[in-house]
Image (tube, rainbow, N blue to C red):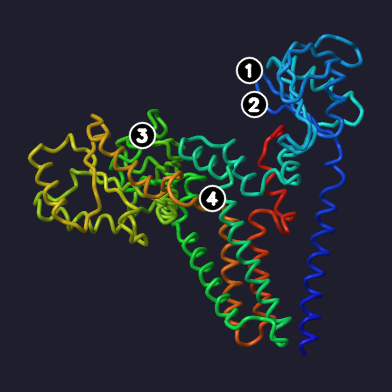
């Protein structure tokens, strides 16, 4: 029986290794043997454009266009000449990066030229006439860096996020991931899980020969439990990193004519939505991306919530309620002139009104009540309402606002920024957060596999070991150490040509 279990386990390991090795070899030959070139800087007219070349024929490309070879990693001013017509194309800086000390790990070069379209096209066309060179595909330079071991997949994704970052918080998170902070966490878990798996394998193979110390499985159980705890804490981050990467969904909701579209226009500082005294003007969702305090926000104005017989408006109300359910944060706009005249009834009215807006959303932290049209009530009324609401702890932190006079806007922005910080966290503080849905999926699969280990621990140690092996494979898929081929196209296709 012991022999059968060992044979079954060994066959599984050999098959996995063989499959992974074949896939890796297939991915490491072919296109990566070519020399590729592309514009690596931004598109459009600019003062300086960068054209990158990478591959074994990079030295030939430099010599063909400049006739003089520069020193390694030194910017040299050169005349750039068409290799066939001998026409002067430009004068620019040429840099030579011999492999493996380059971004891609291959021999590579960069031509820093003037950014006019004619100059760029001339240099690219000249490179295309050199034998062995071809235009790069989208993300091909970064793909080569990955296969050369210069970057793992989390660092590749961090680079992609940095390229697309639009706010300060996004930039900070992307830089931290690109520096390898997130990858190091997953690699540490992988190393520890490898040790656990090795101990189980050793126990299966040698415990009957009394070559294994007593208590090794107990120590192993503690190690697996510790990994589960750390992964669980990492997963229970309220999706802060993913939210920061993709943007916080902020929805403006409320009754008709409460001032929702006016609020959207005030926050965007432009006429993004039509404002009219006619109730039900907004029928569809109006979305505007914003940078608020360095945090990315997708702000949505929605149809007024009311019962109506108009089929088009009914669809608008349905979409509005759907957006509120999906929102990370709801700005519930309330018309102050509709509040009860009796101050003591205000909190009761507001609680019921907010419930009608939020419906399925019960978390008060997902809502900021905005009491609009404060310019239409007296200062005494405003003070009495504030006193009642501050005394009532059941009403979330509220803001007085006048979209007409802009009074209260600073207070609203302060409250909104505080809430965004809570939703997204500080990307520079503490452990790095999950940034990709695929990270979360593979980590959840890993934790389920570790549960399999505990389930079979006292029943069949071979099956328990298989749980550890599945968990290790799931971790490897995050960094690209194991079985990364099927997700590479999804990751690299988001890169522009030349990066």
Q: 438 or 267, which lies in front? A: 438
Q: In whole angstroms, how far apart are the C-alphas of marks 2 and 3?
A: 30 Å
> Secondary structure under badge 3?
helix
Q: How far apart, in angstroms, are the residues tagged by discs 2 and 4?
A: 25 Å
Seen from this angle, which residue lies furthest bottom?
1
| Label 1 Cα neighbours within 10 Å, binned few <14 / some 14-19 / many ≥20 | few
Toward the viewer: 102 or 371? 102
Are dots 1 and 2 in contact, CB under 8 Å?
A: yes
Q: Are the residues at dot 3 and dot 1 in contact (C-beta closer than 8 Å)? A: no
User: First in sequence: mark 1 or mark 4?
Assistant: 1
Disc 3 marks which residue? 267
Residue 486: image location, x then y, percent = 73, 56
Which label's residue is closer to the chain start, 2 or 3?
2
Horizontal arrangement in the rendering, residue 436 relative to residue 427 (left or right) = right
Going from N to C along the chain, the mark reached first, 2 or 4, is 2
Classify mark 3: residues with Cα within 10 Å, few (<14), some (14-19) or many (20+): some
Position of the C terminus, as image quadrant, is top right
The residue wearing badge 4 is 435
Identity of the residue drawn at 66% across and 49% down: 153
Question: Where 54 sits versus 222, above or below?
Answer: above
Tell me whether the residue at label 4 lies in contact with that at label 3, contact meaning CB atoms closer than 8 angstroms.
no
Q: Which mark is residue 46?
A: 1
**Quarter where residue 19 is shown:** bottom right
Nearer to us of marks 3 and 1 is: 1
The residue at 24%/49% (across/down) is: 397
> What distance separates the C-alpha of mark 4 from that of mark 3?
27 Å
Of helix, strand and loop, which one carries label 1? strand
Can residue 311 be seen here? The reply is no
Q: Position of residue 22 (x, y in %)?
A: 84, 58
């Amino acid at each position: 029986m012991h022999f059968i279990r060992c044979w079954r386990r060994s066959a599984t390991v050999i098959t996995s290794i063989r499959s992974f090795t074949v896939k890796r070899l297939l991915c490491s030959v072919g296109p990566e043997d070519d020399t590729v070139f592309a514009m690596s800087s931004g598109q459009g007219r600019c003062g300086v454009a960068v054209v990158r070349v990478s591959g074994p024929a990079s030295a030939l490309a430099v010599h063909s266009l400049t006739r003089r070879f520069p020193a390694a990693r030194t910017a040299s001013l050169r005349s750039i000449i068409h290799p066939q017509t001998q026409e002067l194309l430009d004068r620019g800086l040429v840099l030579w990066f011999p492999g493996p000390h380059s971004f891609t790990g291959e021999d590579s070069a960069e031509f820093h030229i003037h950014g006019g379209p004619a100059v760029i096209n001339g240099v690219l066309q000249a490179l295309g006439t050199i034998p062995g060179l071809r235009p790069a595909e989208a993300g091909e330079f970064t793909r080569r860096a990955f296969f050369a071991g210069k970057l793992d997949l989390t660092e590749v994704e961090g680079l992609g996020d940095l390229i697309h970052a639009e706010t300060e918080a996004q930039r900070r998170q992307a830089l931290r991931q690109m520096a390898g902070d997130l990858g190091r966490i997953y690699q540490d878990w992988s190393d520890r899980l490898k040790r656990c798996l090795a101990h189980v394998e050793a126990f299966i193979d040698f415990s009957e020969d009394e070559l294994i110390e007593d208590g090794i499985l107990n120590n192993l159980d503690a190690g697996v439990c510790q990994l589960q705890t750390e992964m669980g804490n990492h997963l229970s981050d309220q999706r802060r990193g993913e939210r920061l990467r993709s943007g916080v969904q902020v929805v403006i909701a409320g009754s008709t004519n409460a001032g929702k579209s006016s609020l959207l226009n005030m926050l965007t500082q432009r006429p993004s939505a039509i404002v009219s005294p006619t109730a039900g003007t907004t029928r569809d969702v109006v979305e505007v991306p914003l940078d608020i305090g360095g945090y990315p926000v997708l702000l949505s104005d929605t149809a007024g919530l009311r019962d109506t017989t108009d089929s088009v408006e009914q669809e608008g109300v349905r979409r509005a309620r759907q957006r509120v359910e999906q929102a990370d944060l709801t700005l519930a706009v309330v018309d102050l002139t509709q509040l009860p005249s009796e101050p003591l009834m205000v909190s009761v009215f507001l609680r019921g009104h907010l419930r009608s807006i939020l419906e399925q959303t019960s978390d008060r932290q997902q809502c900021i009540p905005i009491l609009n049209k404060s310019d239409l009530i007296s200062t005494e009324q405003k003070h009495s309402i504030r006193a009642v609401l501050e005394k009532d702890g059941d009403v979330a932190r509220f803001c007085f606002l006048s979209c007409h006079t802009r009074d209260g806007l600073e207070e609203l922005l302060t409250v909104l920024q505080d809430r965004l910080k809570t939703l997204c966290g500080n990307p520079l503080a503490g452990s790095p957060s999950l940034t990709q849905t695929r990270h979360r999926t593979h980590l959840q699969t890993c934790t389920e596999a570790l549960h399999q280990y505990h389930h079979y621990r006292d029943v069949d140690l071979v099956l328990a070991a298989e749980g550890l092996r599945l968990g290790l494979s799931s971790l490897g898929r995050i960094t690209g150490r194991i079985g990364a081929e099927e997700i590479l196209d999804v990751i690299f296709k988001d890169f522009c040509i030349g990066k």
